[in-house]
Image (cartoon, grey):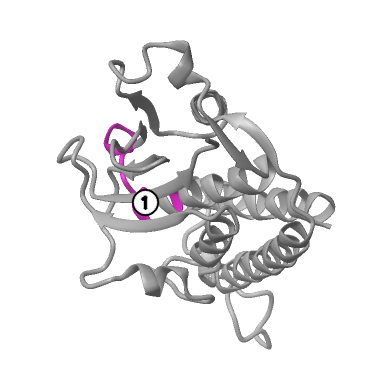
């Protein structure tokens, strides 16, 4: 269901955004206050309000599809052993190459640790599609709430890979340079179904989805202010997963 509905919903939402941009350009050159125009005197709401309603309802539909898809996916997980290094490296490359992404993507790892094939072939057991879904939701959260209205040169997304020395796990860090989370905002609030971290559109299902997927992989999710990598990053999502022994 997700694959049959998610793409049309995303395309429709993208179309609404492009229509809004086009109307904005028309307003500059030809018509004044076009967003405030109404169909007739009997119409209560202006054009801008209807565009906002359409965008909001598409987001709700997308969230419903995502949650329903997650429940099906968790009930039918397809676990396989994959190299965590190669998996994260591949995800980073895909993220960099996606058309429309207007932010810098940096993938970094401790070269002294991952310099040999043994470490690069370190395995985790996962459902690749579900785990990638969690990663994508973290990226989407940064785009919606962190990068919104920022100039391109201030948008950076960092993906880091670490191996704790005292336990058999791997740590994946996702940091962004956008606006910080609201003061006092906690991980518990983020993962609560329907929670919102800002006033930006959306019903707040992203954190819930990420948490459920990480738990299904016997992992841990943490939310931290800033980043130990650089002061430019304002928040970090950390996923810790067990490695295959």
The image shows a total of numbered marks equal to 1
Question: Which quadrant of the view contains residue 39?
Answer: bottom right
Work out whether residue 49 can be spotted: yes
Question: Which quadrant of the view contains residue 80?
Answer: top right
Residue 12, image x, y percentages: 72, 53
Residue 177, image x, y percentages: 27, 43
Looking at the image, residue 5 lies above or below residue 198: above
Q: Secondary structure at mark 1?
A: strand
Q: Would you say 38 lies left or right of 110 here?
A: right
The residue nearer to you, when weighing 123 against 54, is 123
Residue 151, image x, y percentages: 31, 39
The residue nearer to you, when weighing 239 against 152, is 239
Check residue 145 for magenta coloring: yes
Q: Which residues are magenta?
A: 143-156
Check residue 69 for magenta coloring: no
Q: Would you say 108 lies left or right of 125 here?
A: left
**Residue visible at 50% across and 38% down?**
243
> Looking at this rendering, what residue extends furthest in the front direction?
245
**Residue visible at 36% across and 27% down?**
106
Residue 210, image x, y percentages: 53, 58
What quarter of the picture does the N terminus occupy?
A: bottom right
Looking at the image, residue 25 lies above or below residue 33: above
Q: Which residue is mark 1?
A: 237
Looking at the image, residue 55 lies above or below residue 44: above
């Amino acid at each position: 269901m997700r694959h049959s509905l998610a793409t049309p919903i995303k395309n429709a939402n993208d179309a609404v955004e492009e229509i809004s941009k086009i109307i904005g350009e028309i307003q500059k050159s030809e018509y004044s206050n076009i967003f405030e125009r109404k169909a007739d005197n009997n119409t209560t709401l202006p054009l801008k309000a209807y565009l906002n309603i359409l965008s909001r309802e598409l987001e709700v539909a997308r969230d419903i599809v995502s949650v329903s898809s997650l429940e099906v996916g968790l009930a039918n997980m397809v676990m396989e052993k994959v190299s965590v290094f190669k998996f994260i490296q591949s995800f980073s490359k895909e993220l960099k190459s996606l058309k429309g992404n207007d932010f810098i993507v940096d993938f970094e790892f401790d070269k002294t640790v991952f310099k040999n094939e043994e470490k690069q072939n370190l395995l985790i057991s996962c459902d690749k599609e579900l785990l990638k879904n969690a990663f994508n939701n973290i990226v989407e959260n940064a785009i919606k709430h962190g990068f919104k209205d920022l100039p391109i040169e201030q948008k950076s997304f960092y993906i880091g890979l670490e191996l704790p020395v005292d336990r058999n796990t791997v740590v994946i860090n996702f940091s962004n340079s956008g606006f910080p989370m609201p003061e006092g905002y906690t991980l518990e609030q983020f993962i609560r179904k329907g929670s919102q971290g800002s006033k930006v559109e959306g019903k707040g299902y992203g954190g819930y989805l990420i948490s459920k997927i990480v738990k299904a992989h016997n992992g841990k999710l943490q939310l931290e202010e800033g980043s130990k990598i650089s002061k430019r990053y304002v928040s970090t999502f950390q996923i810790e997963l067990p490695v295959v022994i």
